[in-house]
Image: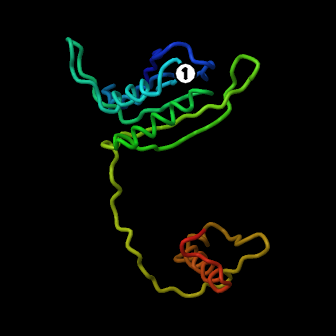
Amino acid sequence: EHLWLKIVLAGRPSCPPPALPAWRNTTARGGGTPKGRMAVELKLSTQKSQQFYARAARSFLEGVPEKDDKPAKPPVDTVTLSALGNAIGAAIFTAATLEKEGLAVVASVRTRLAAVTGPAKHSPSIAVVLKRKAALKALSGSLAVTTEATSPIEGQKPGTSGLRKKTKVFMGKNYLENFVQATFDACKADGVAIQGGT
C-alpha cells in the first residue's frame, strides 16, 4: 500500500514545481506494517534560507525526539531534495552540508528542464537523493584478484560488426572472459595505456 501526503514546508516557490508528491511512505506488502520510516521529498524554494533547508533535512535524517506531548519521529533513510531555478543553490548547499557532517551520502543527482508557467516556459531543476549514512549496508565479499588458466577458443574473431555469436556460445566456459582479456592484451601490445586510464 502506498500513502501519499502533500505537505507545504514553505511559501510559494519562485517557479511552480513539477507535479511530484512531497512525501512518499512505502509499507511492507502483506499486513500493512511499515517496513521502515518513509522516504521524504523536500521541495526547496527561495522563500527560505539555505540554512533552513539544511536544518529541515537534518531533522528528517536524525529523527525528532518526543517533546511537548508530541510523539518522537524516527529517522528516514532517504531524503530527496527537489529545487527549481534559483533554489538549486540551496539544494546543493544542503546536500554538501549534510555530506560534510557525515550524516548522509549523495546517492544520485538528476537534472532536467521542467515546464513552468510564465515567459520562460522552462526552468532548470535538480533532484538530489540523500541516503542516511547510518542506514547504509557495507558490501560483503572478496575483491581479491584471481588467475585462471585458459586457452584460445576456435572462431572467436570479431568481424566488421563486432563479435556476433549466439547467446549459448557466449555463455560457454571462459568465452566472454577470453575475449575481454584478449582485447586488453591487444591494446597493451599497441601501446595503449590501460592502467590508471580508460
Q: Is residue 96 above or below residue 124?
A: below
Give the residue at x 36% y 39%: 132
Q: Residue 21 in the image: x percent, y percent? A: 51, 22
Instruction: Pick the quarter of the image with the N terminus.
Output: top left
Coloring basis for residues: rainbow
The residue closer to the viewer here, 163 or 107, is 107
Neighbour tally class for label 1: few under 14, some 14-19, many 20 plus, Cα within 10 Å: many
Q: Mark 1 points at which residue?
A: 46
Corner quadrant of residue 181: bottom right
Give the residue at x 44% y 24%: 2
Please tell me whether mark 1 sits on a helix, a strand or a loop: loop
Instruction: Pick the quarter of the image with the C terminus.
Output: bottom right
User: How many numbered tags mark residues here?
Assistant: 1
Corner quadrant of residue 177: bottom right
Q: In this view, does 87 lie to the left or right of 191?
A: left
Q: Residue 49 in the image: x percent, y percent? A: 47, 23
Q: Residue 35 in the image: x percent, y percent? A: 32, 32
Give the residue at x 30% y 27%: 33
Corner quadrant of residue 144: bottom left
Q: What residue type is labelled 1?
A: Thr
Q: Residue 155 in the image: x percent, y percent? A: 68, 82
